[in-house]
Image (cartoon, rainbow, N blue to C red):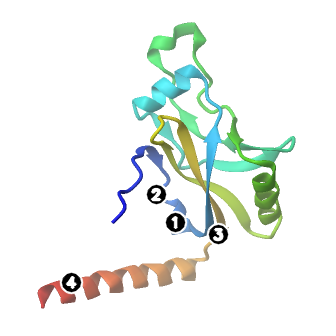
Amino acid sequence: MAEPSPRKVIALNRRARHDFAIEEVVEAGIILLGSEVKSMRLGRADISHAFADEREGDIYLLNAHVDEYKGANQFNHEPKRPRKLLLKKRQISKLMGAVQRKGVTLIPLALYFNARGLVKVELGIAKGKNLYDKRASLKEKEWSRQKSRVLKGE
């Protein structure tokens, strides 16, 4: 059995899988300032309200909050600045084609350090769920929990 990839999770977007149906997942690099990386090493990032969008032919992570690093003093960063994502041209055109469809958006699912110590973003091509979709997924999750309890008991 292969070992899971060693990645240190900085921030998770737990609401994303509840509010959206994730069609596909893409990993992207991100351009950061030094004070942002140091703040992320302390786990001070929030992507719960973040999304990705196209600007000037590139994809940017918008509305992601990275706390200021106390030791950076005057060289600190703006907490909610747009951050450029590192993707290949083919990936950008594929993602933008998907976003132009009705109701599809790019949502960051996780922010993490990979095995080499680089910050990566896991983007999901997501379609918004309706209330009845959310209810159906909750029923399915509850049923699988009950099923596992019954199987454990035997």
Kindly identify which residue carries mark 1: 17
- How far, Cα to Cα, is label 3 from label 1? 10 Å
Kindly identify which residue carries mark 4: 149
Q: Is residue 108 visible?
A: yes
Residue in the foreground of this view, choosing between 131 and 58: 58
- How far, Cα to Cα, is label 4 from label 1? 24 Å
Q: Are marks 1 and 2 in contact (CB under 8 Å)?
A: yes
Residue in the foreground of this view, choosing between 44 and 23: 23
The answer to whether 153 is drawn above or below residue 89 in the figure is below
Kindly identify which residue carries mark 2: 14
The amino acid type, in three-letter code, at marker 3 is: Gly
Q: Is residue 79 left or right of residue 114?
A: right
- The tag earlier along the polypeptide, 4 or 2, is 2
Q: Are marks 3 and 2 in contact (CB under 8 Å)?
A: no
- The tag earlier along the polypeptide, 3 or 1, is 1
Report crowding for label 3: few under 14, some 14 to 19, many 20 or more residues within 10 A (C-alpha).
some
Residue in the foreground of this view, choosing between 14 and 40: 40
